[in-house]
Image (tube, rainbow, N blue to C red):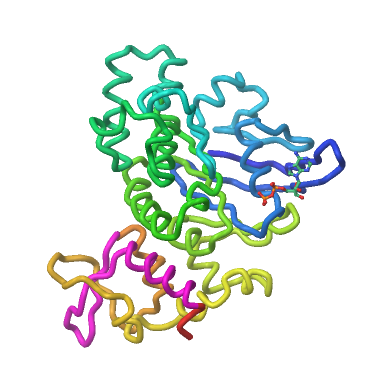
């Protein structure tokens, strides 16, 4: 568990980036920090692994102040993925992923096994990629290596700062979809910074919307959709709010459902897309029923894809 207790960060030039920020991030939670540029997301994230120091207040990990942790151990136990993955250009992919396990003096055989396992996990064939240099990979593949590297020594916490935002829309969506599956498998506490509400709604267990260094609303995607606290929250959710309030019935064609071949939790087509989104994260797939008959299967990937297309088109409604 990560606890922010009344945290304030003022930079040397007098800029207060984060102000009286209190928050509890639960173990195993996928927690999203979202808000407009300059609202303090990155500063908040970087204070967790002490890349920035807290000016006032405290951050605790499992009840212990981060200032009482040995800084090296703290960083080894917190994976970190950035927008532009800083892979070391002169090192192979395998060497890049092995850095923290080597620092932790893992046995060579264990490191090598772990590299293969991680490359498989992030969808890169180990025999094809592990001896390559970063420049021989696409941007999307480099981000995948970045995720593998952050997971290398099996840290309980992963910090991710806009990890997909430098990618072209197609690679970005592919990586988001793969990451949806990955997050179920790895079961870590993930703190994820984004300015993309689609990403927040589809990946996050809970979301914190920030403005001017302060919390505006903390809640589940469903709470954001159904109980936006004020106009700022509403404007941030934008036209997704209306589409998420539509019943599935009206979206069946656009959602392009799979045929209902495998059993999944059943929901009636009168359910709104927002309600479906709230349960789909746990269920992974839903069978949409109309008048007691199954009409198709809806998965989280489909909702993500739909929201992307929807926001690119500027909204259907
Ligand atoms: P976000 O990630 O939401 O875009 P940041 O945490 O990067 O926001 O920045 C929050 C505020 O702090 C901004 O006003 C930014 O200009 C300022 N800031 C960030 N880093 C520094 C720094 N090293 N020195 C001074 N001000 C900074």
168 sits left or right of 7 in the view? left
- Vertical comparison of 176 with 3: above or below: below
What residue is shown at x 41% (from left), y 46% (from top)?
A: 140
Nearer to the camera, 76 or 23:
76
66 or 193: which is nearer to us?
Answer: 193
Q: x%, y% of residue 234?
A: 62, 74
* Picture quadrant of residue 172: bottom left
Q: Quadrant of residue 217?
A: bottom right
Q: Specify whether 273 is left or right of 8.
A: left
* Residue 266 lies in the magenta-colored region: no
**Image height of 145 relative to 202, above or below:** above
Q: Is residue 159 left or right of residue 115?
A: right
Residue 103, given in percent of the width and then of the height, sits at 47, 15
Q: Is residue 305 magenta?
A: yes
* Picture coordinates of residue 183, whole percent (x, y): 37, 46
Residue located 52% across and 34% down the image: 86
Q: Nearer the viewer, residue 294 or 101?
A: 101
Q: How many marks?
A: 0
Q: Residue furthest left?
A: 261
Measured along the vertical axis of the image, is residue 17 above or below residue 224?
above
Residue shown at the point (41%, 66%) measured from the top left: 278
Q: Foreground residue, 107 or 245?
A: 107
Above or below 111: residue 65: below
Q: Residue at x 27, y 31 (%)?
A: 117
Q: In which quadrant of the rendered view does residue 288 lie? A: bottom left
- Across and down, in percent, residue 100 comes to 45, 22
In-image side of 67 versus 278 (left or right): right
| Most distant residue in the right direction | 14
Q: Which residues are magenta?
A: 284-313
């Amino acid at each position: 568990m990560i606890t922010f207790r009344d945290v304030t960060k003022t930079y040397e030039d007098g800029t207060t980036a984060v102000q009286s920020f209190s928050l509890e991030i639960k173990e195993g939670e996928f927690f999203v920090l979202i808000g407009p540029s300059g609202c303090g997301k990155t500063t908040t994230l970087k204070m967790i692994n002490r890349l920035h120091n807290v000016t006032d207040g405290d951050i605790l990990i499992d009840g212990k102040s981060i200032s009482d942790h040995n800084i090296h151990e703290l960083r080894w136990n917190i994976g970190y993925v950035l927008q532009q993955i800083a892979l070391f250009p002169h090192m192979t992919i395998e060497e890049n992923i092995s850095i923290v396990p080597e620092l932790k003096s893992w046995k060579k055989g264990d490191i090598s096994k772990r590299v293969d396992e991680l490359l498989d996990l992030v969808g890169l064939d180990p025999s094809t990629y592990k001896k390559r240099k970063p420049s021989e990979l696409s941007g999307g593949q480099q981000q995948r290596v970045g995720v593998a590297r952050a997971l290398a020594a099996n840290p309980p916490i992963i910090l991710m700062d806009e990890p997909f935002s430098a990618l072209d829309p197609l690679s970005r969506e592919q990586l988001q979809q793969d990451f949806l599956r990955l997050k179920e498998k790895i079961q870590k506490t993930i703190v994820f910074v984004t300015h993309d509400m689609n990403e927040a709604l589809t990946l996050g267990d809970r979301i914190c919307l920030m403005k001017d260094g302060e919390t505006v609303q903390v809640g589940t995607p469903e709470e954001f959709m159904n109980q936006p606290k004020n106009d700022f929250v509403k404007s941030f959710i934008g036209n997704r709010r209306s589409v998420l309030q539509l019943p599935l019935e009206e979206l069946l064609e656009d959602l392009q459902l799979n045929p209902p071949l495998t059993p999944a939790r059943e929901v009636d087509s009168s359910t709104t897309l927002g309600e479906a989104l709230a349960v789909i994260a746990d269920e992974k797939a839903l069978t949409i029923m109309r008048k007691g008959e199954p009409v198709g299967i809806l998965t989280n990937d489909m909702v993500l894809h739909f929201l992307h297309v929807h926001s690119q088109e500027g909204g259907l409604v």
